[in-house]
Image (cartoon, rainbow, N blue to C red):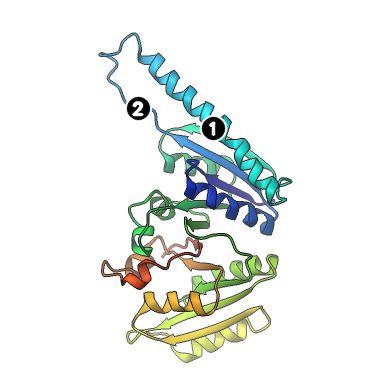
Amino acid sequence: MKRILFPTDFSEAATNAFVHALEFAKIVQGELVLLHAFELPVFDNQFFPENYMIIYESVELSQFEMFKEEIPKLRAIAEERNLDKIRMTHRLMDGNLLYNINKSIKDDKIDYVVMGTEGASGWSEFFSGTNTGNVLADIDVPMLCVPIDAKFKKTETIGFTTRFRAKDKKALKNTIKLAKMANAVVKCLYVKTSKSDVDRSTIKNWEEDFENEPIEFFVIDSDEVKETILDFILYQEINVLTMVTYKRTFFEGLFHPSLTKKFANNFDVPILAIPMED
């Protein structure tokens, strides 16, 4: 059974992402590990020699009480969606969020992470300078990143962006497995810029390798990579976009500070980021 880590701060963004986590667990026949991490305040105990432990214990207690109050709300959401049979376990951990996520990935043998994000005005901000972006850059398991405006829709079409690297093929095979579990199709996009070095024979080999799979390949000539991906999501009715991260270098190369307003205001589909070494 697949194990899915769901870090939450019980915010609106996290609650929205929880619905995606439940539905994803249903697709992969997995279970959820709910993680709430909090950082204790730093005090110089020479100024609080008597109250030092009381302060820490009160913070821990308040976090525990909130955790205890919020978990039933998440279980109620699961019941409303008839997904209350999905097994859920809970972790309340003090310390740095990224450290605790990585600790849980190791200790709980996590296969996927699902995490919400809010306040991003576009993909460049979404993948940098946020908790989600920081986690994405530093974990070694696939991560489903859910923007706050991405309301859940049944997964019927999964997008996959590629540059036809050899390691992309492994990620594509895993994406096809997910698609079959969801009874979905995969639409694979390559944005061929004026600097692209992929030849037609490589593309043809990929098409032949996957000719018996539920997949369709799209090669679009354009130097506007960001806008082309956005249009692809819109016109091909993509429910989830899968991207190979290559330890974030893909995103660093793809995104530029001069995002168009059109692009920045229309990001509303989850991204499944699959980490690969360069």
Residue at coordinates 49% horizontally, 74% vertically from top-left? Answer: 233
Q: Residue 88 at x, y = what percent?
A: 65, 41
Quick check: 149 above or below 40? below
The amino acid type, in three-letter code, at marker 1 is Phe
Distance from the alpha carbon under mark 1 to that under mark 2: 18 Å
Name the outermost residue toward the bottom: 200
Pointer 1: what residue? 67
Of marks 1 and 2, the one in the foreground: 1
Residue at coordinates 40% horizontally, 15% vertically from top-left? Answer: 53
Q: Secondary structure at mark 2?
A: loop
Q: Is residue 88 left or right of residue 193?
A: right
* Picture quadrant where residue 45 is located: top left
Residue at coordinates 56% horizontally, 68% vertically from top-left? Answer: 239
Q: Residue 97 at x, y = what percent?
A: 43, 40
The amino acid type, in three-letter code, at marker 2 is Pro
Q: Which mark is residue 41?
A: 2
